[in-house]
Image (spheres, rainbow, N blue to C red):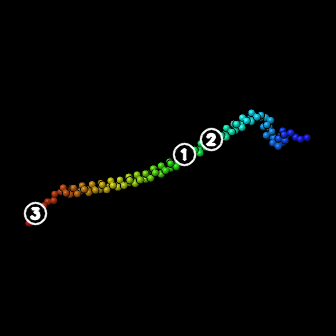
């Protein structure tokens, strides 16, 4: 006598036979539908993550940070240069004061004989 499909199925795949006995078609369709919806949701999250990676601000922020560092270094150099100019101007002013003081002193004239 030939075995029925259920007996063969139980022998070859006991897990599937258990599912077939315990879950009828509407329940299986519901489970498959939920699994499909979960798969679609996971895929949408994956594509959203890829879109976020495309709009990652990190490279632009790194460029801005590099420019800012360059500007700050230039500013520090300019401060030093300004300080040097201030010292030179102070020295020039002191020199001019001494020139003006020397010019203000009257030199007594000597008589010629």
Dot 2 lies on which element? helix
**Image coordinates for residue 18, horizontal then vertical, percent:** 80, 37
Number of numbered discs on residues: 3
Q: Is residue 24 left or right of residue 62?
A: right
Residue occupying image coordinates x 16% and y 59%: 107
**Label 3 Cα crowd, 10 Å radius (few <14 / some 14-19 / many 20+):** few
Give the number of the mark in front: 2 or 3: 2
Q: Is residue 19 left or right of residue 49?
A: right
Residue occupying image coordinates x 56% and y 46%: 54
What distance separates the C-alpha of mark 2 from that of mark 3? Answer: 110 Å
Give the number of the mark in front: 1 or 3: 1
Q: Is residue 2 left or right of residue 76?
A: right
Picture quadrant where residue 11 is located: top right
Picture quadrant where residue 96 is located: bottom left
Q: Earlier in the sequence, mark 2 or mark 3?
A: 2
**Image coordinates for residue 106, horizontal then vertical, percent:** 16, 57
Residue occupying image coordinates x 67% and y 38%: 37
- Please name the residue that numbered disc 3 is placed on: 111
- Please name the residue that numbered disc 2 is placed on: 44
Q: Which residue is at the front of the view, 60 or 68?
A: 60
- Please name the residue that numbered disc 1 is placed on: 55
Q: Is residue 25 above or below residue 66?
A: above
Q: Which residue is at the front of the view, 58 or 108?
A: 58
Q: Earlier in the sequence, mark 1 or mark 2?
A: 2
**Label 2 Cα crowd, 10 Å radius (few <14 / some 14-19 / many 20+):** few
The N terminus, quarter of image: top right
Residue occupying image coordinates x 21% and y 55%: 100
What distance separates the C-alpha of mark 1 from that of mark 3? Answer: 93 Å
Answer whether labels 1 and 2 touch (C-beta < 8 Å).
Answer: no
**Label 1 Cα crowd, 10 Å radius (few <14 / some 14-19 / many 20+):** few
**Image coordinates for residue 31, horizontal then vertical, percent:** 72, 36
Q: Is residue 26 left or right of residue 82?
A: right
């Amino acid at each position: 006598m030939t075995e029925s499909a259920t007996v063969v199925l139980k022998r070859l795949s006991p897990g599937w036979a258990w599912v077939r006995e315990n879950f009828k078609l509407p329940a299986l369709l519901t489970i498959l539908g939920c699994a499909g919806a979960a798969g679609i949701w996971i895929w949408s999250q994956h594509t959203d993550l890829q879109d976020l990676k495309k709009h990652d601000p990190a490279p632009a922020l790194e460029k801005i940070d590099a420019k800012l560092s360059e500007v700050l270094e230039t500013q520090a150099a300019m401060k030093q240069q300004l300080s040097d100019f201030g010292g030179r101007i102070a020295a020039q002013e002191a020199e001019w004061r001494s020139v003006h003081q020397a010019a203000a002193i009257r030199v007594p004239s000597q008589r010629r004989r």
